Amino acid sequence: MMCRLFSAFVVLAALAACGGPEPEPAAAPGAGSAPAPAPAPAASFRSVSAQDFQADLDAGKVPLLLDVRTVEEYAAGHVAQTQNIPLDTLESRLAELEAHKGAEIYVICQSGVRSGRSERASQLLLSKGFTPVNVEGGTGAWVGAGMPVVEGATPSTP
């Protein structure tokens, strides 16, 4: 019993040490009392669900859909009319996308989760002056919503 109580105390102490924001450092003597300016918010991009993506496709609002999965994943099944540029080659192939710089580029991967390939690709595109739109849930959500996929590789030039 005593061992369990000690273990519980250790776990609680560890959690308490890990949680909460860092305390603000004390101001240097003689320093002004005005707080430091807040950092600029990170630039962001729009995200759409698989259903909203389908609606945008139907309405002709998707000038380019970029699939950033590997060639093998792409060949196993992809949304029709996508262009495949794997994430690991995207930066070196940005020149291929220059014609689409003024339009939204929809970006899809397998899962579309936070910190997934489509989000990393979207961040890269945004940093280079493009307007990405992340497809939430990726190809998995697309298939899960009963939407069609095409198998086999197709040309990957946008």
Image: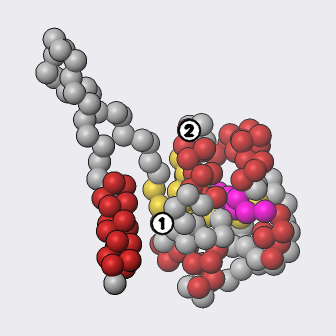
Q: Which residue is mark 2?
A: 127
Residue 3: image x %, image y %?
Answer: 38, 77
Secondary structure, mark 2, is helix
Amino acid type indicated by mark 1: Val
**Who is closer to the viewer here, 13 or 95?**
13
The numbered disc on residue 48 is 1
Amino acid type indicated by mark 2: Ser
State the residue at coordinates (21%, 23%).
27
Residue 9: image x %, image y %?
Answer: 32, 68
Q: Would you say 69 lies left or right of 28 here? A: right
When asked about the image quadrant of residue 34, the answer is top left
Looking at the image, residue 58 lies above or below residue 41? below
Residue 158: image x %, image y %?
Answer: 75, 53
Residue 123: image x %, image y %?
Answer: 56, 47
Q: Is residue 107 visible?
A: no
Please state the extent of the stretch shown in magenta in the rendering: 64-70
Q: From mark 2 to mark 1, how far is it between C-alphas?
A: 20 Å
State the residue at coordinates (73%, 47%).
90
Mark before the other along the chain sequence, 2 or 1: 1
**Who is closer to the viewer here, 63 or 51?**
51
